[in-house]
Amino acid sequence: MTPDAILALYEWVIGACFRCGDANLFVTPIDAVVTPRGERYPLAACGGCVLDMEEERRRFAERKGEKYHPGRLGRPPA
Ligand SMILES: [Zn+2]
């Protein structure tokens, strides 16, 4: 699967990337942090970081002998 095809699996909005800290670029919602007081902070990642994390997932699946499914960052396992 090409990087473009992987990125096309996500929806993009302008925001800041929690992983590399860049702001005002296209990001996709990945996760959220909930504080002990119940405040919810959404986390989003930019394209470069999404591809890094997808590559980590791919290697992890390979090590475990499982099939890798791109496009599932921040989504519950199917
Ligand atoms: Zn980033």
Image (spheres, rainbow, N blue to C red):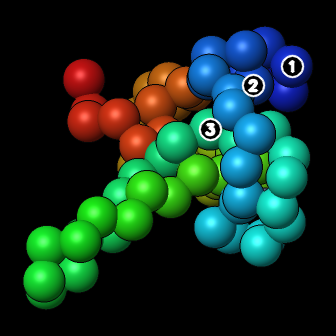
Secondary structure at badge 2 equals helix
Report the amino acid beneath label 2.
Leu
State left or right for residue 63 relative to residue 56: left
Residue picked out by circle 2: 7
Name the image quarter holding residue 75: top left
Callout 3 crowding tier (Cα within 10 Å): few <14, some 14–19, many ≥20: many
Image quarter hosting the C terminus: top left
Q: As rendered, which of 40 and 3 lies closer to the eye?
A: 40
Q: Is residue 28 visible?
A: yes
Q: Measuring 26% from the left and 33% from the top, which residue is drawn there?
A: 77
Labels 1 and 2 touching (C-beta < 8 A)? yes
Near-viewer residue (55 or 4):
4
Give the residue at mark 1. 4
Instruction: Work out whether residue 36 or residue 66 is closer to the camera in this orientation and state it.
Output: 36
- According to the picture, the residue beneath numbered tag 3 turns out to be 28
* Residue 48 appears in view: no
Of badges 2 and 3, the one in the foreground is: 3
The percent coordinates of residue 21 (x first, y second) are 77, 73
